[in-house]
Image (cartoon, rainbow, N blue to C red):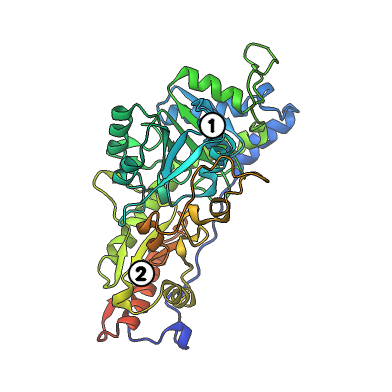
Amino acid sequence: MEVEYSERLAAEGGPKAKRTPFGVRKRHGDTEKRYLNEVIDSDVLFYYLGSKVFSFEKRFAEMYSKRHCVACSSGTAAVHIALAALELPPGTEVITSAITDMGSLTGLLYQGLVPVFADVDPRTLNMDPASARRAITSRTGAILVVHHSGLAADMDSYLELSREFNIPIIEDCAQAFYCEYKGRLAGTMGAISCFSLNHFKHITCGSGGMLLTNDEQLRYLTSLYLDKCYQREEGIRNPFFLAPNYQMTELQGAVALAQLERVENIVTRRNQLGTRLTELLCKLPGIEPQTIPDGCHHSYFMFLFRLDLRKLGCTAEEFSAALNAEGVPNSAHLITGGRPVYLYDIFQKRSAFPGTHYPFDRKYSAGDCPIAESAFDQWITMGLFEHYSEQDIDEIAFGIGKVANHLLHQPVQTISRTT
């Protein structure tokens, strides 16, 4: 059936572009139940006395061809542990992206480290290596590279910075399971990498995380940092540094282990759907999908596209509202608080710890990262899930085109849509 873009917008009483319901997503099943039953039957929920967490660590390390995986309670914990394991003294600067989740920064502040924010690439929203280079000082102790939305950052450039300045790279892969960069998996290139298993990620055990490294010393330190600095491997309980309790339970490990059987298929399917949607949107004036550099395999934690607001003559909020009315769920402002992280109150007020500005030794101001700031007024964020059908993708693309065409006041066009 040929459907004309000249249909009235749903917000104005026209038919919705998304005319068929999305399918039901089923994330857990028989394997998770079986592994959970095995844990319950064992009557052991503590990771060090059980088997599921250790099995999960072994399997995940094998999947990424890394020597060591250490599981923990969350992705936030994983980043904290990674930073702590580098043994950076308080006051050390850590460079990271202006567009990320607070989970990338919580452990950084707890360690007394100073975040330094680099701007982003306007086409990918990943941290711009040139901006990161300008941020390096004699106090820089690490670069935390965030693979945003499931798209790998420019790791060749960051590895070059690492070699040139002798600065370790931490990869934040919370959104980037099985994301590829020039034939290498994100999470296999830095000194240590961090993953998340919270509810919103590709795979989940409710909340959980893990670290990957090939370095035996980092592996040992991470095992201490997640467990109060108890040296369980040696049977010693005599902590020699301050460490939290970030253990993963056997229940989490059971579900996480089962979820590993799904992750590759999930990412493959999302990439197929994201590629299809990108190809459809590339034909639409005023719409620019996130650029995927050559050699990258996007894992589509989210689907992003940028609006040419001058051409469309609207705000991102107006476009988003019209698209939501068409039955296409989406958000303006990149769903991360509507601003780069350094504009959060905790950074503006330097209020990480009551009664002091510690560890901040600088002020963060509007204008620090202008590309990141402007992105929050230009980009639309959508979920892209593995249970979507090709018809779902076609209807999503039709809805975006319908709204864009209405705003552009272009002559009537027609496209084919699956009925």
Question: Is residue 264 found left or right of 158 in the rendered image?
Answer: right
In the rendered image, the vertical position of residue 252 relative to residue 55, given as above or below:
below
For the residue marked with disc 2, what is the amino acid? Answer: Ala
Mark 1 secondary-structure assignment: loop
Q: Position of residue 304 (x, y in %)?
A: 39, 60
The circle on residue 10 is none
Question: Is residue 88 found left or right of 393 in the rendered image?
Answer: right
Q: Report the number of numbered marks.
A: 2
Q: Position of residue 80 (x, y in %)?
A: 55, 35
Outermost residue, right direction? 43
For the residue marked with disc 1, what is the amino acid? Answer: Pro
Badge 1: few (under 14), some or many (20 or more) residues near its Cα, within 10 Å? some
Residue 183 in which image quadrant: top left
Q: State the residue position of label 2.
A: 397
Residue at 44 percent across and 74 percent down: it is 323
Q: Point out the tag, 2 or 1, that comes first from the N-terminus.
A: 1
Asked if residue 8 can be seen in this view, the reply is yes
Q: State the residue position of label 1.
A: 90
Q: Position of residue 105 (x, y in %)?
A: 52, 43
Between circles 2 and 1, the one closer to the viewer is: 1
Depth check: give the residue in front, 107 or 201.
107
Residue 220 in which image quadrant: top right
Mark 2 secondary-structure assignment: helix
Asked if residue 419 can be seen in this view, the reply is no
Residue at 41 percent across and 35 percent down: it is 187
